[in-house]
Amino acid sequence: MAVIRISAPETAEKNEVIEIKAMIQHPMETGYRRDERGDVIPRDIITNFRCGYNGEIVFEAEFLPGIAANPFLTFYLRATHSGSLNMSWTDQDGQSWSATHALTVA
Amino acid sequence: MRAAFAFLLGTLAACNPQPANTGAEMDLPRGVVRSGYEFLQPETRILQDDDFENPGLLWVQQGAVLFETPMQGGPACASCHGEGGRLLTGAAAHYPAMESQSGELVNLEGRINLCRERYQGAPALAYESSELLALTAYTASLARGMEQSVNITGAAAPYYDAGRAYFFARKGQYNLSCHQCHDENWGRQLRGDTISQGHGNAFPAYRLEWQDFGSLHRRLRDCDSGIRAEPLPYGSETYVAVELYLAKRAEGLVMESPGVRR
């Protein structure tokens, strides 16, 4: 279970630029570290983040091993119509987690 | 030459009637107690203070869910302690505390595991498991901003003494005690770091070095291995006793968990 935290306004004026913050609990293990026995700790990272706005992708990010644990993104988008923001994270093995945020545009 | 030497010795003795090193071990004076927060860089303080960005809140949020979830063989934590941990507000500020049934000193982790085994029909959780961290983070967060205050009298007194003895004992290849860094040299530089007073009021906490959330015992183990001493096992009675000594030593500081430390 990965914990997700989203911070975004619930309502916005039409064409207002809104700030979205999204954080997910994930170790982002680089694959370069070794454990106390000297064995390599296998890489385990999220590789992709997407934010859909009523189905249309409005923000996308590619993550590499240099990204810190519990990745935290802040981005902006223009509120044009009411709908849902669907945020999803996909890891290197194809497992994914998602969260939805409802936005009402006046 | 000999005369000059004798004179010097005489002067030294006159200036300093007590030998410099009596072996007397002074606790941190009450007036100078300062949270580790004050030794952090401004950016790290901002991270702790921000109620969205603080990564420790991921564990608090996870703990809040676990707290309300009924066990397979027993009640949810919330069925005794109230929804939203209403009846546990501030409780974490008084841990470690004596446990009346076993007559032993328990910390927050130990208390949670006792509850699970006795009342919830659930197995104890392993130290540093994500579930135990989440539950300690959540219960500690219910005491956020409250003053740490523990009872060290009665049956707790021997634990306090044992914790204090560990704090003052030199150990490891560097032959250092906790006291030497955190009482005698706090505020000074240790390479790039400023030495803090070594309080535990922010724990369980998110450490940037760990890129993870961890218990006070994990922090103590890091300190012990830092001076090249053998770390004690998680949940060891001695570390719980050290926790009690640290809590008393930090009296007057407020609970910061989920804190952020470097």
Image (spheres, grey):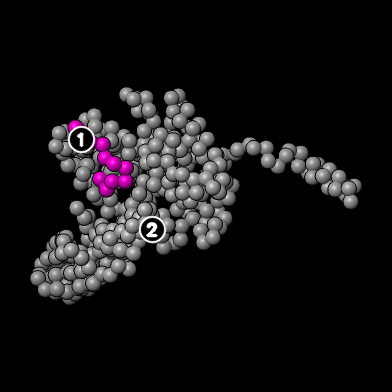
Which residue in the structure is indicated by mark 2?
Answer: B208
Give the mark nearer the N terminus: 2 vs 1: 1
Can I make out residue B142 in this image?
Answer: no
Residue positioned 47% across, 28% down in the render? B158
Which residue in the structure is indicated by mark 1?
Answer: B122
Residue positioned 14% across, 73% down in the render? A57
- Quick one: SS at disc 2? loop
Residue B188 point in image, percent of width and height: 57, 55
- Residue type pointed to by label 1: Ala
Q: CA distance from mark 2 to mark 1?
A: 32 Å
- Residue type pointed to by label 2: Leu
- Mark 1: few/some/many CA within 10 Å (<14, 14-19, 20+): some
Residue positioned 21% across, 30% down in the render? B119
Label 1 chain ID: B
Side (left or right) of B158 relative to B59: right
Side (left or right) of B74 relative to B196: left
Tell which of B240 and A80 is nearer to you. Answer: B240
Q: Which residues are magenta?
A: B120-131
Residue B126 point in image, percent of width and height: 29, 41
Dominant SS type (magenta): loop
